[in-house]
Amino acid sequence: MTEVLLAVVAGALIGLSLGALGGGGSILAVPVLVALGQGPAQATTGSLVVVAMTSLAGAVTAHRAGNVLLARGLTFGLVATGGAVAGARAASAVPEPVLLAAFAVLMLVVGGLLAVRQWRARHAGPADRGARRAVLDDPIITFSPTFACQCPRALKVLVTATAVGLLTGFLGVGGGFVVVPALLIALTLPLDLAAGTSLVVITITSSVALAARAGSTPAPDWSLVAALTVAAALAAVAGARLADRVDTRRLSAALTGLVLAVAAYTAATALPALV
C-alpha cells in the first residue's frame, strides 16, 4: 500500500513535469520504479507505459492551447519509429547496469547541450531571434505549386529523429528531455512549441518501443505502473495548462536543472554496479 501511495505522489510530479516542460517524464519514472523495487529493465519498460499515456493526455491539452505543431510532430514521430524498434530489440541483449550507466551519460550530454543553448538564447540579438522565427515558418518540403526540398534540414530531421527513436527503444526514454532538445535543434522551434509538439512525438515513439519490447524484457509490477500512469496523466493536463502561463525562460531553466540533477543521481546509482 505504501509503495502505491509513493507511486501516486511520484506520478503527479512526473505528470506536472511532462505537461509543463514537455520533459522529465522518463527520467523521473525510471528512477522511481527502480526505487520501488523494479529492476532497470522492468523500470524502462514500465516507464514507456507511463510516458505514452501521460504524453497523450498532455498533447491533447497542449493542442487545445495552440502549443502543438501537429504535422511536424507526427512527421518527426513517424520517422523515429524505425529507430525505436531497433533500440527496443537491442536493449534485451545489454546488461542492466550498462543500461543505467548509458542513461546517466545521455542525461549529462543533453543537460550540457541545453545549458549551452540557454546561454546562447540569452545573448542572442533581435536579428537572431527574427531569423529563427523565419526558419520556423518556412516549410522543409513542399509539393505545390512545385516540389521544393531544403535537403540539409530534411537530413537533420531524419538523423535526429532516428537517434531519438533508438534512445527511446533502448533506454525506455520517451520523455522530452530527449525530444525537446531534438526539436529545438532539428526544427528550430521556440521552447513553448517544442514542449507541446514533443508530447505528440513521445506518444508515438513510446507506444512503438513498448510494442517492440513485448515479450523480450521482464514485465514490471503493473499495479505500480498503473498508479504512476493514472496520477501522471491527470497531472499532465494541469501541467500543460501551466505551461501556457509561465515564462518560457523559466521553463528552459527548470528543464536544464532537472536533467542535470537526475543525471547526477543516476550516475551515482549506476557506477558502483559497474565496478
Image (spheres, rainbow, N blue to C red):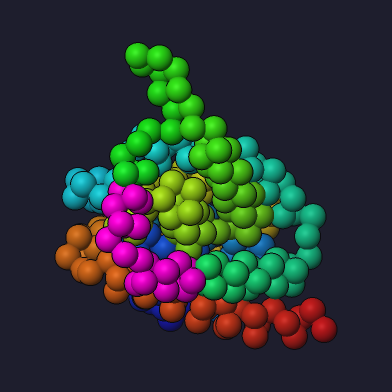
Residue 94 sits in quarter:
bottom right
Q: Give the side of residue 260 with respect to residue 7, left or right.
A: right
Is any atom of residue 85 visible in this view? Answer: yes
Residue drawn where x is 55% and y is 59% of the image = 173
Residue drawn where x is 29% and y is 74% of the image = 250
Does residue 56 lie above or below 17 as drawn? above
Asked if the magenta segment contains residue 127, the reply would be: yes
Q: Main secondary structure of the magenta part?
A: helix
Q: Give the side of residue 20 with respect to residue 94, left or right.
A: left
Does residue 92 lie above or below 14 as drawn? above
Is the C terminus in the top left, top right, bottom left or bottom right quadrant?
bottom right
Q: Position of residue 72 (x, y in %)?
A: 39, 38
Residue drawn where x is 62% and y is 54% of the image = 167
Is the N terminus in the top left, top right, bottom left or bottom right quadrant?
bottom left
Q: Position of residue 143 (x, y in %)?
A: 41, 18
Q: Give the side of residue 142 with respect to residue 196, left or right.
A: right
Furthest residue toward right: 275
Q: Which residues are magenta?
A: 114-133
Does residue 256 lie above or below 173 as drawn? below
Q: Position of residue 219 (x, y in %)?
A: 62, 57
Residue drawn where x is 35% and y is 57% of the image = 128
* Viewer-nearest residue: 169 or 92: 169
Q: Position of residue 37 (x, y in %)?
A: 59, 76
Asked if the magenta segment contains residue 55, the reply would be: no
* Viewer-nearest residue: 221 or 109: 109
Q: Give the side of residue 40 with respect to residue 241, left or right.
A: right
* Viewer-nearest residue: 6 or 199: 199
Does residue 135 lie above or below 219 as drawn? above
